[in-house]
Amino acid sequence: MTFQGALAGASRLRDDVVIVNTVLHEFAETLGEAVDAKDGHTWRHSEEVALVSRALALALRLSPVEADVIHVAGHLHDVGKIGVPDAVLLKPGPLTDEEWLLMRRHPVIGADIVRPVRSLRECGVLEMILHHHERFDGRGYPDGLRGDDIPLGARIIAVADSISAMLQKRPYRRNISFAKAQQEILDNAGAQFDPQVVEAFYDIRRSVQQTIRNCNADDPGLPTRKLHANPGLL
């Protein structure tokens, strides 16, 4: 093969990789939106988690490629809720113990959904989906992993997921302000959350707040999000 032919082949390969990555991201984004659409209270939750997770990954000095993988996992983190009965997912009130057991299966269901996709297995997205509800102190689910045994991407998504969830009104609780959500994250460093990820969040807190604002700016019908700042905490 000539040098020019080799270059042409390499260029085609790069183009194929770009196309595959683009399609994979668009697929993940669409699937995340489909999950959010099942429940009006979680509108754009997966998009917020994906964007904030990528920002946290970069703040932790991960490479852009690693940040992009975590971004895709953020879109897909709740895909397992497709397998949760609507009677549980959309219940307008507190869940019973049995219903919580069903809800807590969604990370396992999500991992099983993406398992046939080799690229999602090999780049770690499956493990991030499976473990995004683990706690740094080992009291999470489904496997009770603790500390660094939890994949870093899952530890990042855990913080992004919690921030987004606390800002959204749910049938069983009220939403809270960004300042209060921020304090909850800080108070649970070392218990629920990885302290290093919490530190990265604090460093870019203003950017995270603006990212969530921008994510919802084009929908005037969206339920009010409490994003006002408390100067004492920001």
Image: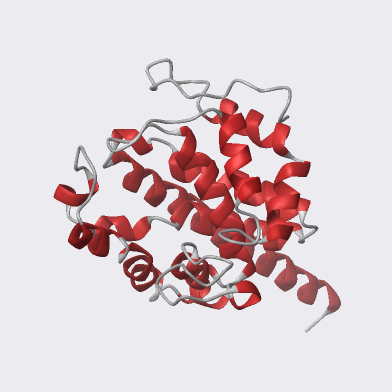
The residue under the point 31% across, 39% down is: 37
Is residue 112 placed above or below 101 in the rendered structure?
below
User: Which quarter of the image is occupied by the N terminus?
Assistant: bottom right
Residue placed furthest toward the top = 220
Q: Nearer the viewer, residue 69 or 231?
A: 231
199 relative to 121 in the view: left or right: right
103 relative to 114 in the view: left or right: left
Give coordinates of residue 97: x percent, y percent.
22, 60
Give coordinates of residue 205: x percent, y percent.
71, 37
Examine the image and state in which quarter residue 148 appears: bottom right
Colour style of the rendered protein structure: secondary structure
Examine the image and state in which quarter residue 70 appears: bottom right
The residue under the point 54% across, 27% down is: 177
Is residue 62 placed above or below 232 in the rendered structure?
below
Residue placed furthest toward the bottom = 1
The residue under the point 69% across, 63% down is: 66
Q: Nearer the viewer, residue 18 or 182?
A: 182
